[in-house]
Structures are given as C-alpha cells and as structure tokens.
Image (cartoon, rainbow, N blue to C red):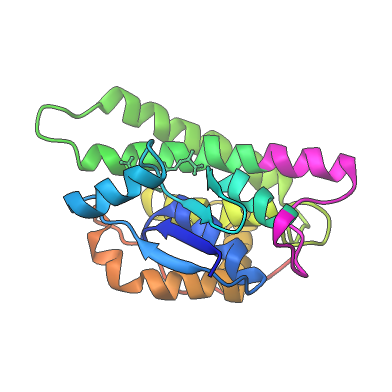
Amino acid sequence: MSLVLYFHPLASFCHKALIALYENGTPFEPVIVDLGDAASTAAFRAVWPMVKMPALRDEARQATIAEATILIEYLDSFYPGPVRFLPADPDAAWRARMWDRFYDHYVEEPMQKIVTDRLRPEGGHDPVGVEQARNQLLEAYAFAEKEMAGKRWAIGDSFGLVECAAAPALFYANAVVPFEETHPNLTAYLDRLMLRPSFARVLDEAGPYFDFFPMERKPRLTPLGVPQP
Ligand SMILES: N[C@@H](CCC(=O)N[C@@H](CS)C(=O)NCC(=O)O)C(=O)O
C-alpha cells in the first residue's frame, strides 16, 4: 500500500487527517505511534524528525507529508476523491484556508494548552498561560458562533478542510471549556460534525482511549440533537 499514516487514535490533529482519509475511502496503512514507547518513538522520528503527529508517508511518490492541513491538501492534489477539501473558487479557497487556521490556532492550540498543562509535573504548571488559553477559547467561540449562524458547513454548502479542522477542535474544546449551553450555533455545528460518518468512525475508534484524556469532564460522545439551522 502506498500511503502509511503515523498517528494516535486519541490525538486531535490526527483526527483531522483521518476524517479526510475516511471521507474519500482513501486506502492507507495505519501505524499507531506510542510516544511512551522508545522503539515506537524512534521509528516515528526516523520518518518525521519533529515527532509530531500526524505524518503521512507516500512510498509511491517518495514523500513524507507532515502538518495536518498540508496532508489534506496533498491528498486533495494527488489522491482526490468525491469530497474536495479545498474549493476551486479562489475566493472560497482563501476563506477555507483562513478558517482552517482559525480552528487550529484559536481553538485547537488553546484547548491543547489547557489539557497538556494537566500532564505537567507538580511545580511546572503555567496558570497564567492556561487562563490566557481559556480567554482565547471564549473569544473564538463568540466569533465562530456568529459566523455559523444559518450555516450548515463553514464554506458554502460543502464539507471540506474547515470541517476536518473544526470537528476535533470543537469536540475536545467543548470538554475543556464547555459551550453547549451558551453557543447554540456552534453546538449545532458540532452535532452535525459528530453525525458525519467519517468523524463518527474516528470517535468510535478513539473510544477505547478516552479514559486517558486527562480532564475530569470527558468529551461527550453523542450529539445533543440541537435543532439544525
Ligand atoms: N502543527 C501540527 C501539530 C501536530 C501536533 O501537535 N500533534 C500532536 C498530537 S495532536 C503531537 O504530536 N503531540 C506530541 C508531542 O507534542 O509530543 C499539525 O497541524 O499537524
């Protein structure tokens, strides 16, 4: 098989890549990276020295592709399927790229900051950084709530790159700084994302690992059934 995905089933940036692969039924060999295991980490470091997941190895094209967004763009270019992740229209394309960056930088990253602070040793916590991350999340929620008013997907009528980024970001962010009681448009968007078969499959496969999520409130695994716009 030409494509090998290095990933972990619990890792949110890996979810982003898996959604894109599952959307188009793109065949690939999955390799789970266990960063707690020296041999697994060394094997992954040999593929991608930054040791950040996901990374895709394409033997047919002798290419290693890292960064979830770039990986999705690569699939769109070289292994296209019925779902196109970047719109052909240039005006829609820059909007898709911008909202992809929005979900990565302003939802994923602050969410991860809060979660990974839990894993730091006693005396190594960063309460100021965690507070900033929480405020960043609240600002992002307010903006995305307005943006998603009356919309099904972020760009036009098509599921695409933004949804690959938004699904895991909102899923975990809602466990960390809940928005489901305060932001109905965002909650309905998360519901739609969770009902999408590609992301439902990702969550199903992550199921056995959720006990390792280091927060008291675990992610909720079923949509709330919020009325859809
Ligand atoms: N900018 C990268 C971020 C990838 C990333 O941070 N992945 C996390 C898992 S969600 C990771 O590999 N963490 C391991 C570590 O930081 O040691 C992307 O967009 O793919």
Residue 47 in view, yes or no:
yes
Q: Residue at x 41, y 35 (%)?
A: 134
The part of the chain drawn in magenta is 78-99
Left or right: 184 in relation to 117: right
Asked whether 80 falls inside the magenta stretch, the response is yes
Which quadrant of the figure shows ligand 1?
top left
Residue 101: where, in percent of width, then height?
62, 37
Expressed as whole percent of the image width and height from the top left, the position of residue 14 reads 46, 55
Q: Quadrant of residue 33?
A: bottom left
Is residue 56 covered in magenta? no
- Residue 172 picture quarter: bottom left
Residue 164 in percent (x, y) is at 60, 56
Across the whole image, how many numbered discs are drawn on residues?
0
Q: Which of these two is toward me, 93 or 227?
A: 93
Instruction: Say if 177 sits above or below 190 in the image.
Output: above
Q: Residue at coordinates 40% horizontally, 57% vertically from top-left?
A: 7
Q: Nearer the viewer, residue 127 or 48?
A: 48
Q: State left or right for residue 147 relative to residue 106.
A: right
Where does residue 131 sit, x and y in percent of width and height? 35, 29
Residue 124 figure quarter: top left
